[in-house]
Image (cartoon, rainbow, N blue to C red):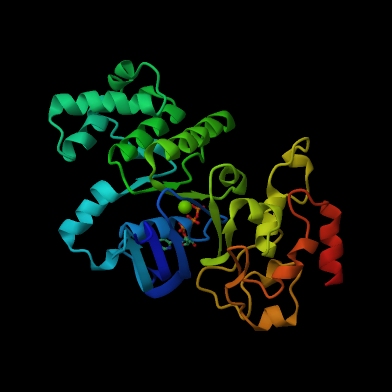
């Protein structure tokens, strides 16, 4: 069977004031059946653009300038209108950051969830019954009561459960979660992540889980891809990537994870110094070099390719084997100063 999702060298640009600004640069990744793939990167790295390109729902000024996205082996660019509609109605479901925007404020929860089943062919009564049982499956207690409510009468966490129920009602082969917990408070975030982890086993959908937070991805994903300035800079199985990152950017993200016993505001090294390049700017050599503690002349001259580094891992760094000298989650912050001073 073909992968559920495959991106082959996908590039996307947005037209801004007459100029095409590239935001994804040759992104390739693949998701097998039942696999959970975490896509991580800071704001603006292109994560949502990946999700939009998969469903062919880029904004009007967005344009896939190269490569292909395949869902269940079918190139989405080649789908006709009916096939595209079918893909969006059944094969691929998306959940976004703001559940309030995904719900219709003037319809009850029951109507909205039932409608998904009706679109897929269930008669009204059956659709209502299935809606109720779907709400139960996303661990909403008293679903019959919740069905009578309007979205604004529910908390953000409850709204997101409803949105997830509507996504799963399609029984999709691919579920894309784009920062589903951003904006929810930490306890609710943990509950939603826990829910997704349970549902992945019950439903067997492949999941593309998008987040700017490696910590959220840690317990949930099988594999992780790290996006930086529109490029995949590292990919690998989640445990091995966490234990030993092979790209300095990943090491930096791990260093940014809140550590137990250390309050965020007391930790001066909890962000990566500097900024990513402005979209569309031309950078000689490695895009991460200006922020990198390992960068040297080679890095500033030659853009490193994404290459296998063993154990099913890929890294886009000339010095992948030296990244362990940089501190990461467990590392000592002081070592960073030594590393950037020495190299
Ligand atoms: P975030 O974590 O903030 O959601 P992201 O990784 O999802 O960020 P994208 O939304 O994919 O990033 O955006 C990638 C880049 O493309 C950013 O520089 C963004 O400003 C730009 N961009 C996104 N949408 C458009 C648009 N419609 N027109 C022009 N530029 C856009
Ligand atoms: Mg986004």
* Residue 74 to residue 253: above or below: below
Residue 312 is situated, as x and y percent measured from the top left of the image, at 58, 63
Residue 108 seen? no
Residue 202 is situated, as x and y percent measured from the top left of the image, at 40, 35
Residue 286 is situated, as x and y percent measured from the top left of the image, at 63, 75
- Residue plotted at (25% across, 47% down): 90
Does residue 89 appear to the left or right of 140 in the view shown? left
* Residue 272 to residue 299: above or below: above
- Residue plotted at (65% across, 55% down): 240
- Residue plotted at (66% across, 83% down): 301
Residue 226 is situated, as x and y percent measured from the top left of the image, at 57, 59
Q: Looking at the image, how many numbered discs can be counted on the residues?
A: 0
* Residue 334 to residue 192: above or below: below
Q: What is the quadrant of residue 154 in the picture?
A: top left
Does residue 34 appear to the left or right of 257 in the view shown? left
Q: What is the quadrant of residue 54 in the picture?
A: bottom left
- Residue plotted at (23% across, 23% down): 129
Which sits in the foreground, 102 or 136? 136
Residue 280 seen? yes
């Amino acid at each position: 069977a073909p992968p559920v999702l495959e991106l082959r060298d996908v590039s996307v640009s947005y037209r801004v004031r007459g100029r095409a600004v590239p935001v994804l640069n040759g992104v390739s990744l693949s998701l097998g059946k039942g696999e959970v793939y975490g896509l991580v990167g800071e704001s603006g790295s292109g994560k949502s653009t990946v999700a939009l390109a998969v469903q062919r729902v880029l904004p009007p000024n967005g344009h896939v300038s190269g490569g292909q996205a395949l869902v269940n082996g079918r190139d989405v660019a080649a789908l006709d209108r009916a096939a595209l509609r079918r893909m969006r109605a059944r094969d691929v479901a998306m959940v976004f950051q703001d559940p309030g925007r995904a719900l219709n404020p003037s319809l009850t929860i029951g109507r909205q969830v039932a409608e998904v089943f009706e679109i897929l062919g269930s008669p009204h009564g059956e659709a209502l019954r299935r809606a109720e049982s779907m709400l139960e499956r996303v661990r909403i207690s008293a679903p019959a009561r919740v069905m009578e409510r309007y979205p604004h009468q529910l908390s953000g966490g409850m709204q997101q459960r409803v949105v997830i129920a509507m996504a799963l009602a399609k029984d999709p082969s691919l579920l894309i979660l784009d920062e589903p917990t951003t904006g929810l408070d930490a306890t609710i975030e943990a509950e939603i992540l826990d829910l997704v982890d349970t549902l992945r086993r019950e439903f067997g959908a492949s999941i593309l889980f998008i987040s700017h937070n490696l910590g959220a991805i840690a317990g949930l994903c099988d594999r992780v891809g790290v996006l930086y300035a529109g490029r995949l800079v590292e990919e690998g199985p989640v445990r091995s990537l966490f234990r030993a990152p092979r790209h300095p950017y990943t090491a930096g993200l791990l260093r940014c994870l809140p550590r137990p016993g250390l309050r965020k505001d007391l930790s001066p090294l909890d962000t990566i110094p500097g900024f990513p390049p402005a979209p569309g700017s031309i950078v000689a050599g490695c895009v991460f070099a200006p922020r990198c503690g390992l960068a040297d002349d080679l890095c500033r001259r030659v853009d490193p390719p994404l290459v296998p580094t063993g154990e099913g891992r890929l890294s886009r760094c000339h010095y992948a084997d030296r990244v362990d000298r940089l501190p990461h989650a467990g590392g000592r912050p002081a070592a960073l100063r030594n590393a950037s001073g020495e190299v």
